Amino acid sequence: MPRAMQGRWSVLNDSEDIRRSEWNTNSPRSERSKTLFEEIRASIYNNDKEESSFWRPVLPWGGVFTIKAGRKAVSCIPLYVKINLKNTCTIDGFLMILYVILRDNQGFSRELAVFLGKQFVEYFLYLMDSCDYTTVKMLWIWDRMSKRQYRSEINQAALEIDLFGNEHENFTKNLENLMCTMQECLCSNWSCPARFQEFLKTTISISPPHTLPHRDPIQSAVDEFFCPKLVLCSELGCDGLREFSQRIFCHGPPPFVILNMQQWKSEELSYVPYHLALCQHRYLLEGATLFNKEEHHYSAAFQIDGCWIHYDGLRSDNLVLLQKPPELLLLSSLVYIRASDK
Ligand SMILES: [Zn+2]
């Protein structure tokens, strides 16, 4: 169990035994020989026309995490015995895509562990494979999110955690320095109060190109994000020109990138590239998260061996095999994985 998570358990109760037993009783280790990923992949290949959905719910919306007090708890009064999760769609789609990426790409787990910790990554995969979906959400909330990113309140004997909000806040921002990029800049004016500066960004938010039409607007926007540029210096009283270097990844090209597409309108998304050149590396489209404004609800789509699957935690059939690649007109994000150098 990651340390941050253990620390938070002490809020519940001082007893070590209780903390330990919670995770054990909430993690029904199944005897299945296949990983969840292998089961989903097998269902794609066994699929016949009538049966286009996976045979059981995967990562359903919300969740109830039950805390069963251990023997020693008799002497203590637990603060609450149940945790109700609400509006989890702000993390669900990404957790699903993250799981598929890690299981489908050998070596990516090790790379991600550098940023999120080996224990976190191993436990995440273990919980997903055990179909312990509420615990996997608790792992994300307690190990990755900060307290100000969600609302929680105690309601009778239950703690309610509400993740209503934005998935880029609740998920993408909590990937540490995985996608961290840096750009240096220098002002032409020798008396500039801040001549040399460094700019770090930990997420990749791209804007639609100003001049349309573009053959490949998303690639253009990514190029724009990384390219060197010359702008008027914004330091007070300085009239110099500020030259920005090429943007680079601080820790090398990450195994996957999430492009924040919130600024894009549907009409600008008629073309979504399957291949993307990103800072001199080739990336391939793996999935996307979609946002329905009217319902304020997120869902996701991802591909396995070129077959596209739509995920929506609110539906009872929540993994549905699509007959063709989805229309990505309501994008919240695009997820690309690094192509192997072979
Ligand atoms: Zn300046």
Image (spheres, grey):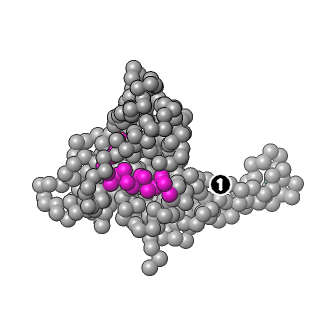
Residue 42 lies left or right of residue 341; in this view the side is left
Identified at 84% across, 53% down, the residue is 192
Label 1 crowd (10 A; few <14 / some 14-19 / many >=20): some
Amino acid type of the residue that numbered disc 1 sits on in the rendered structure: Leu
Q: Position of residue 119 (x, y in %)?
A: 48, 54
Q: Nearer the viewer, residue 221 or 185?
A: 185
Q: Is residue 129 magenta?
A: yes
At horizontal 39% and vertical 46% (from top left) the residue drawn is: 136
Quadrant for the C terminus, please: bottom left
Residue 24: quarter of image: top left
Region of the chain picked out in magenta, as a range:
118-134
Q: Residue at x 73, y 59 (%)?
A: 185
Q: Position of residue 333 (x, y in %)?
A: 44, 51
Depth check, front residue: 177 or 36: 36
Which residue is most to the right?
A: 191
In this view, the residue farthest toward the bottom is 342
Q: Residue at x 68, y 54 (%)?
A: 199
Which residue is the site of mark 1? 200
Residue 144 seen in render? no
